[in-house]
Image (cartoon, rainbow, N blue to C red):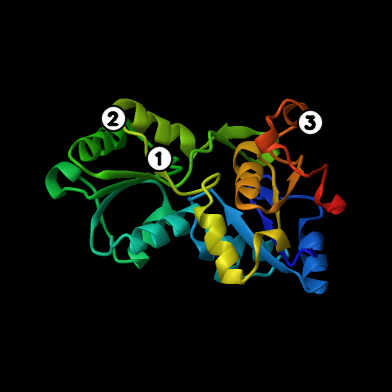
Amino acid sequence: MEPRLFIFDLDGVIYRGEEPMPYAAETVQRLRAEGKLVRFLTNNSALTRESYVRRLTQMDIPCTEEDFMTSAYATALYLQSQGATGKRVFIVGEEGIYEELRRIGMKAVTDPEEEGADYVVAGIDRSFTYDKLRRAHYAIWHGARFIATNRDATYPASGGRIVPGGGAIVAAIATCTGVEPLVIGKPNTYSMELLLQRCGVSPQEAVLVGDRLDTDVLVGKRAGLHTVLVLTGVTDEEAVRSAPEEMLPERVIRTLAEL
């Protein structure tokens, strides 16, 4: 079946930090010229969809908010479906989570001991402190439901660096509370299924292009998509050779030019 939809991860696939990946803009332009749908699916919860639009537009990839499914946005959609509008949430995260939860009418609290909390939502937080950990611990021990946007241990940054991801912060909260979170982002298929539904495309008509075996490739295979791994992010050829069957992509490419 001819692919109709190409879904790209962002970090390590379209860019690293502020550096666009080679052939990213050209590849997206070519696919669109061929009449293909192009969408972006990221576990990174740091930015709003508007911020992602600005970033990619500056990289010569024009797009709109509707082109993005972020783990923060998927988390907001999930919580909205669970009747969380108007509920109190303690956030360990950045602008992306705050804005998406604000949009569905949740109330962000700063001190669960004083204000109470119905949920703790955690993701990447580059201002993470012991005090935030303590407050998240208090909220969860007093009944707040623990939600994680993702559990990515690392993500690729500019200059070829690999830096700690949101999963490291989620792990700290899980360790001190003894409570495992509900994880919304990849490899959970929730965000992928939302994206397919919105595009009106079956899994067999979609291709996922990512740089991680344990999130991108795994979610693609779980959801029944075609999978392509590009070696511009966190995964190298040695990791592919030693990967379990459930994480093996259909195809491995060195750059997006090979897509």
Which structural element holds mark 1? loop
Label drawn at residue 177: 2
**In the displayed structure image, the side of residue 251 where residue 190 appears, left or right:** left
Q: Give the Cα separation between the discs numbered 3 and 1.
A: 33 Å
Residue placed under numbered mark 3 in the picture? 237
**In the displayed structure image, the side of residue 87 where residue 101 appears, left or right:** right
The answer to which of marks 3 and 2 sits earlier in the sequence is 2
Q: Position of residue 117 (x, y in %)?
A: 21, 48
Label drawn at residue 127: 1
The answer to which of marks 3 and 1 sits earlier in the sequence is 1
Q: Position of residue 75 (x, y in %)?
A: 42, 55
Discs 3/1, front: 3
Q: Give the Cα separation between the discs numbered 3 and 2.
A: 37 Å
Q: Give the residue type at disc 1.
A: Ser
Q: Could you say which is closer to the camera, residue 187 or residue 85?
A: 187
Which structural element holds mark 3? helix
Around disc 2, counting alpha carbons within 10 Å, would you say few (fewer than 14), some (14 to 19), or many (20 or more)? Answer: some
Which residue is found at the position 70% from the left and 33% from the top?
A: 245
Q: Position of residue 246 (x, y in %)?
A: 66, 37
Q: Is residue 163 visible?
A: yes
Query: With respect to residue 111, does 192 lie above or below?
Result: below
Q: Give the Cα separation between the discs numbered 1 and 2.
A: 20 Å
Q: Give the residue type at disc 2.
A: Thr
Around disc 3, counting alpha carbons within 10 Å, would you say few (fewer than 14), some (14 to 19), or many (20 or more)? Answer: few
Residue found at the far right of this picture? 258
Whether pointer 3 and pointer 2 mark residues with C-beta atoms closer than 8 Å, the reply is no
Discs 1/2, front: 2
Whether pointer 3 and pointer 1 mark residues with C-beta atoms closer than 8 Å, the reply is no
Which residue is found at the position 24% from the left and 38% from the top?
A: 140
Q: Position of residue 100 (x, y in %)?
A: 40, 61
